[in-house]
Image: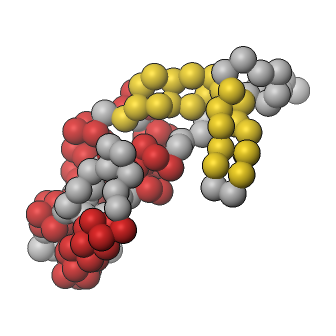
Amino acid sequence: MVAFETPKVEIAFDLAFSVAITPDDVETMAPPGSLLAPFARKLRRFSRFQDRYRARRGRAPGEATGGFHPWDVVAAAYLVDPSLYGDVREVAPRVVGRGVTRFDEASGRARVRMPFSLDVSRFRELMLGRLASTKPG
């Protein structure tokens, strides 16, 4: 039996801050007759709430405004189209405190591949297009 080692890839939480799904985006991704159409009203409301909440709380550097951040979708999109991600480095993650991780590039510890940039316009096109094309049943 031949064993294949799959490279580990870690998608940083921060990459999703560059994407915001706005109430207008909901119209695109949940058109009448789509699988998401029954949830469009709630998605628009959630988008407006998240934008107001994050504005009051304070935004992260480089954080997109106008709606909610699709964290899980940003991570899953790597499986669909890895070319959306750039500045991929091999790093060794190290937790240094509660909620704080450092990424050492010159370390002998376990290493992962990690992208540090995302093509936001292509990601949005992929996500909104795929969701808009889903049909019930």
- Answer left or right for 136 relative to 70: left
Farthest right residue in view: 1
- Quarter of image, res 89: top right
Q: Is the residue 29 above or below the residue 50 in the image?
A: above
Whether residue 56 can be seen here: yes
Q: Residue at x 32, y 49 (%)?
A: 63
Quadrant in which the N terminus is drawn: top right
Q: Residue at x 45, y 22 (%)?
A: 87
Q: Residue at x 27, y 51 (%)?
A: 64
- Answer left or right for 111 relative to 11: right
Q: Residue 25, percent across and down?
A: 16, 60
Looking at this view, is 126 or 17 the one in front? 17
Farthest top residue in view: 106
Q: Residue 121, percent across and down?
A: 22, 39
Looking at this view, is 59 or 5 the one in front? 59
Q: Residue 119, percent across and down?
A: 31, 33
Q: Is the residue 74 above or below the residue 40 in the image?
A: above
Quadrant in which the C terminus is drawn: bottom left
Looking at this view, is 43 or 93 the one in front? 93
Q: Residue 2, percent across and down?
A: 84, 23
Whether residue 37 can be seen here: no
The total number of labels drawn is 0
